[in-house]
Amino acid sequence: MTELVRLTGVSKRYETTGPPALDEVSVEVGTGAAVAVMGPSGSGKSTLLNLVGGLDRPTSGTVEVAGEDLGRLSEKRLAVFRRTHVGIVFQFFHLLDDLTVRDNVLLPAQLAGVPPRTARARATELMDALGLGEKANAYPARLSGGQRQRVAIARALVNRPALLLADEPTGAVDARTGAQVTEILRELNRDGQTLLLVTHDRAMADRCAGRVVELSDGRVVASTPAGVSS
C-alpha cells in the first residue's frame, strides 16, 4: 500500500512559550486506508487534521499529502491543492444557509472550475446515493442534523478527493443519526475512499477505521489496530 499521507517529525506551536500543540508527530495513512485519531480535548487532534488538510502549516517537520510537501506550497497553490485533493467534513456542517442543498454540494466544484454539466451530474449522483434527492431544492434550515451532515459529506466528495477528512462528524447529531453517518463513512472507505477521522467515540473509530492513533499532549502515545485498546 502506498502512503497518501505522511507526517514526519511534525511540530506545531501557536505561542513561543508553553508546550506545542503537536510535538514531533509522525503518522502515515496508506491509500485506501481509514485511520482514526483519538485523544482528550487539547491533545492535538484537530491541529493534526488542519495540517493534513492544508488549513495550517507546521512549525517544523514535513506534511506530505499525495506526494506534495504542503509546507512548501504557496498560499495560491495550497488553495488549489485543497480544492482538488482534500474533502473535509466538519462537526457543525458549515453549510451556507442561503444556498439550497444542491448549490451547497456544487460550490466546491464551481470553485475548482469543473464544467457545470459535469458538476451537476456528480452532485445529483451524490445526493441520490446519500438519500438527499428529494431535498435538492431545500435550504439547510429545513433539514435535520443528519440531513445536514449528509449534505456536508456530499459537498466534501463532489470533487472526488483523494483524501476525506472528518472532524468529529457525529459530534452534533443524535446517536441514531451518528450511527447512520458512521455507516456512510464506513461504506465510502469500503469503496476505496481514504479516510482520516478525528473522533472522541471509540465505537465509531472501531467501526470506521482499520487503525487508531492516540494523541496525548501533542504526542502519539499509541497506534493500534481498531478494536484493540492501548
Image: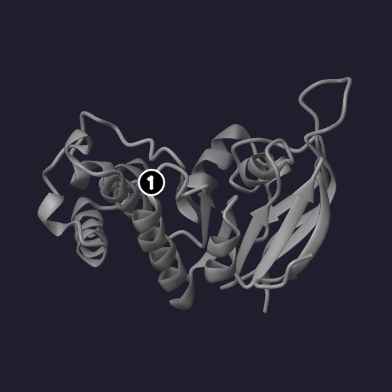
Residue 158, visible in the rendered structure = no
- In which quadrant of the rendered image does the N terminus lie? bottom right
- Taking depth in this image into account, of 191 and 69 the one nearest to the observer is 191
Displayed quadrant of residue 44:
top right
Q: Position of residue 178 (x, y in %)?
A: 40, 55
Please rate how many residues cluster around mark 1, counting C-alpha atoms within 10 Å: few if below 14, some from 14 to 19, many from 20: some
Quarter of the rendering containing residue 160: bottom left
Relative side of 92 to 15, left or right: left
Up/down of 98 relative to 31, above or below: above
Relative to 28, residue 51 above or below: above
In the image, residue 75 above or below residue 39:
above
Decide: is 165 above or below 42.
below
Residue at image location 32% in from the left, 36% down from the top: 95
- In the rendered structure, the answer to whether residue 100 lies left or right of residue 161 reads left
- For the question of whether residue 54 can be seen, the reply is yes
Residue 181 percent coordinates (x, y): 39, 59
| Quadrant housing the C terminus | bottom right
Q: What amino acid type is highlighted by mark number 1? A: Val
**Image colouring:** one colour
Q: Secondary structure at mark 1?
A: loop
Query: Quick one: 121 or 34, which is closer to the camera?
Result: 34
Query: Which residue appears farthest toward the front when viewing the image?
Result: 175
Kindly identify the residue that appears in the image at 82 percent across and 53 percent down. 220
